[in-house]
Amino acid sequence: MDFFPLFLDLKGQSVLLVGGMDSARGKLELLHKAGAKILWLSPKLSPELEPLALLPGVTHSLDPFEPDHLLGMKLVLVCADDLELAARISRLAQDRGLPVNVVDRPQWCSFIMPSIIDRSPLVMAVSSSGNCPRLSRLVRAKLETLFPQSYSRLALMMGAFRESSKDQFLDPEARRRFWDRIFASPIIEMFLSGQEQMAQKALEQELVTQQSAPPRYGQVALVGAGPGDPDLLTLRALRLIQTADVVVYDRLVSPVVLEYARREAQRIYVGKKSSEHTVPQDQINQTLINLAKEGKQVVRLKGGDPFIFGRGGEEIELLVEAGIDFLVVPGVTAASGCGTYAGIPLTHRDFAQSVCFITGHLREDGTLEMQWQHLVQKNQTLVFYMGLASLPQISDQLIAHGMDPKTPVALIERGTTYNQRVYTSTLDRSPELAQKEAITPPTLIIIGAVVGLREKLKWFDPAQFDEPARPPFLQP
Ligand code: SAH
């Protein structure tokens, strides 16, 4: 992080603003809103800026800048076109330990000003750390549409309830859970859609009843985290991750997805350890049950979709038996994510009318149990999960059961991430290719004529990202 974000209390504090460039208007209005006492030095003043000089709390002066003007100041802003003067003020201010900002001259700034969305008392600030102000403006425009003006009144109402909720819930953890429940309830929508009084009454009611209600069991959400690209999360998955007390995850979950969890949320890794031992399934189940019984909101994050080769069914069966509340959120499964990001549609009117998702996981004795003759069908795409180790057998068996050895095959490693690698070959040559290229899991195997469409339809090129490649999956 290049800059430390913070909000300054400038009420009644002295601020020096130098210069009469157009950009002075925005700065002055903002400082005025924040209640600062402004000394504005500007020898020239355009007719448009003149009225600003009359604002209460603003002292305008035509005097040229003197170092003494810095005395007693808490902040210095420069909007002057005289660059020599701007550089000098910046130096003098920094010598005195004063935070200084010179418009459009990052090299002379000790702080930068973000783009803001003002829903006071709720204020959102966005910055690209000077890399691309245009991008922060774009993000700001998006946030403007996501958070209508009514958020300002919502924040005020919540503020009014803050004290009474403190009296009701002495335990901060219980208080946080209360507010989480309120924010997940229809009360918020009610307020935002204009039924403010009704929402206020409902909130008062909740404060009373929640207080006397017996402690409830927590809830476990079995959430699909998608195949890697965090943008492929569902909105519900995102909301649940953001409010969870505990996130239990395994190795296919992208670290970027985990970053959406609250800083205080507990993160429990149950995937393969460096010793290559996975946490046994019954231990995972017990952990989920124990956490829920402690009243925690638990998110059990799984790569892709929890109900596709994710053992999601087994985990919730035990929750049902233990009487724990649960819900399941589907995710984009690897077949869909990897196929799409490799430019391979899994079905196509001319090439494939059906698609099979198959596990290539080997049995303990190293064999694969499969109805091979059912897999060798015309116009069908085969998608193998966990099939890298068994690829030689998959290839041999499909050919032995009549599949054309020249059927196209795609091997997609770390699909949908910056580290995605896609290899295409034919059924007979693919095991050799996997070995030659040292392809590693997670890799998805797609077999069928649709693979040929990639040449024309590929669109995702991880090489185009400047971003330093980061490990897409956790490897603790
Ligand atoms: N529930 C998951 C699948 C878990 S099985 C889902 O719905 O996607 C694990 C296998 O999924 C891996 O061995 C690999 O074959 C496949 N897989 C998952 N994510 C992948 C990715 N990003 N790239 C390639 N293969 C992936």
Image (tube, rainbow, N blue to C red):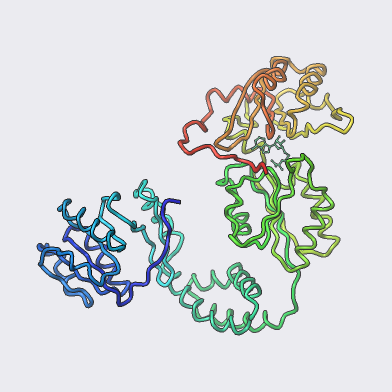
Q: Ligand 1, what quadrant? A: top right
**Could you say where residue 413 lies in the image, as x and y percent from the top left?**
64, 31
Q: Is residue 131 left or right of residue 192?
A: left
Residue that appears at 39% across and 54% down:
127
Where residue 393 appears, as percent x and y from the top left, is 80, 22
Is residue 306 depicted above or below 405 in this figure? below
Q: Is residue 49 left or right of residue 194?
A: left
Residue 351 found in image quarter: top right
Which residue is most to the right?
Answer: 365
Q: Name the side, left or right, on which 343 lies relative to 440.
A: left
Q: Quadrant of the C terminus?
A: top right
Report the front residue among 462 and 131: 131
Count the marks. 0
Q: Is residue 155 above or below residue 147?
A: below
Q: Residue at x 54, y 82 (%)?
A: 163
- Counting from the top left corner in percent of width and height, residue 63 is at 10, 67
| Occupied quadrant, residue 260 | bottom right
Q: Position of residue 42 (x, y in %)?
A: 14, 64
